[in-house]
Structure formats: structure tokens, C-alpha cells
Image: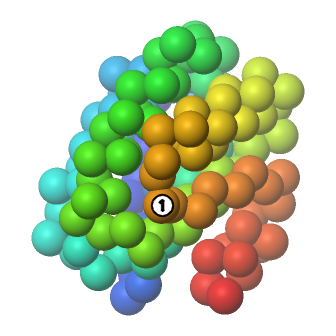
Amino acid sequence: MAYQVAWSEQGVLVAMAGDVDIKELNEANGRLHGDPRFDGMRYQLWDLLGASLGSITRREIEQPSAIDLVAARMNARVKVALVTVSPHDVQISEHYAARSASLGSPWEIRIFSDLAAARAWCLE
């Protein structure tokens, strides 16, 4: 697995590639939360088009939901765009979004199949 993190003035792009497990996903997420720019961030754009979340289970994806809920206490105004087309990865992303909502996360989370559409939504 490899990922790149690119910060901009309003947010961050995380581009993941290869087979991604929950440990690697949590590592990337932790880099965002630990960055001093996190407090002013308005969006996270996760490009998963070159990645496979095939080893991540519905139960495992609940970890980032809970971790992000804690992070939302520091910054509640975040949009999270997840870009993927793989049926499994879409299901995992949908479960993450649903679990986050059920926990009361103030973050707005959407799933996209197109990076340009996701970026446009993030910048609205």
C-alpha cells in the first residue's frame, strides 16, 4: 500500500493505492488528525480509485468512524468525500458514513465515483 497526502488551503487530498488494510487506513487518518492544519480544514478528499479495501470488514471500518467522531470535537465543519467505484469499497464507505451518522458525527460524508465531482462538492 502507498498513499500520498496533499494539503491545500481549505483541505486535504489523500490518494491511496494498492491493497489497503484497516491499519494503513487508520495510519493515514491519524496523519490528518495530528497535523496542525487539521483545525482549519474544511474537507477531506479520499481518492480510493487506485486502491482496494477488500481486506477491510464492516466491523473494522467502524474504528475510523469512532476515531473521527473524537476528531470532530476539534473541528466539526468538515466534508468527507470518498471516491471509489469498486462494489465492496462502496459498501464499506457507505457503512462508514452510516456508522458515523449513527454516532452523531457532525461531518458531512458523501461517496462519489468521480474525482472531479467530489472535488467540486468539497469546494462548495
Measured as percent of width and height from the top left, residue 9 is found at: 38, 88
Residue 78 shows up from this direction: yes
Measured as percent of width and height from the top left, residue 70 is found at: 27, 47
- Where residue 86 sits, quadrant-wise, is top right
* Crowd tier of the residue under label 1, counting other residues whose Cα lies within 10 Å: few below 14, some 14–19, many 20 or above: some
Query: Residue at the spot x=47%, y=16% of the render?
Result: 60
Q: How many numbered circles are shown? A: 1
Measured as percent of width and height from the top left, residue 7 is found at: 37, 73
Query: Residue at the spot x=39%, y=26% of the render?
Result: 63
Colour scheme:
rainbow
Measured as percent of width and height from the top left, residue 15 is found at: 53, 52
Question: As displayed, is residue 71 above or below residue 42?
Answer: above
Q: Secondary structure at mark 1?
A: loop
Q: Which of the two residues, 68 or 3, is positioned nearer the viewer here?
A: 68
Q: Quadrant of the C terminus?
A: bottom right
The residue at which mark 1 appears reads as 106
- Where residue 36 sits, quadrant-wise, is bottom left
Q: Is residue 2 left or right of residue 117?
A: left
Q: Is residue 37 left or right of residue 72?
A: left
Question: As displayed, is residue 50 above or below residue 75?
Answer: above
- Amino acid carrying mark 1 in the image: Pro
Question: As displayed, is residue 34 above or below residue 77?
Answer: above
Q: Which of the two residues, 40 or 87, is positioned nearer the viewer here?
A: 40
